Amino acid sequence: MTTTLSQPEITFVDALTERCDSCGAAAKLEVTLASGGVLAFCGHHAQRHASELAKVATRFTAEDGFDWTAKVPAV
Ligand SMILES: [Zn+2]
């Protein structure tokens, strides 16, 4: 049994202005990395990278209504 030291904070906003870094679609999720960088993903790519993002992110900013928490696997 291990304890997670820091869980990413999730904030919801009305709308994101970023574009997906992978495909250029409107971003549904913005990810702040432990390294200080910021990535943006559409719903499709947020879901595809969910398990990896959960390991490296310190903060998520999701568009209101985007059910991101359901896509993050329990760690
Ligand atoms: Zn995308």
Image (tube, rainbow, N blue to C red):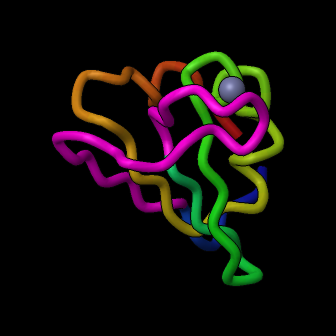
Q: Is residue 47 above or below residue 41?
A: above
* Residue 13 x/y as whole percent: 22, 47
**Part of the protein shown in magenta:** 8-29
Q: Which residue is the extreme one toward the right?
A: 52
Residue toward you, 2 or 37: 37
* Residue 73 seen from this side: no
Residue drawn at (49%, 41%) of the image: 29
| Residue 65 percent location from the top left of the image | 25, 22
Q: Give the side of residue 15 with respect to residue 1, left or right.
A: left
Give residue 20's position: percent from left, percent from top. Answer: 63, 38
Q: Is residue 18 magenta?
A: yes
Ligand 1 image position (quadrant): top right
In the foreground, 14 or 47: 14
As displayed, is residue 74 above or below residue 1?
above
Regarding residue 36, the answer to whether it shows in the image is yes
Which residue is most to the bottom? 36
Residue occupying image coordinates x 66% and y 56%:
39
Query: Could you tell me which residue is drawn at 42 percent across and 61 percent down?
Result: 9
Q: Is residue 2 left or right of residue 11?
A: right
Q: Is residue 7 left or right of residue 39?
A: left
Name the residue rendered at 30%, 54% in the picture.
Answer: 11
Based on the displayed image, in which of its 4 quarters is residue 64 positioned?
Answer: top left
Given residues 70 and 31, the one toward you in this image is 31
Residue 31 locus on image (x, y percent): 58, 56
Q: Is residue 27 magenta?
A: yes
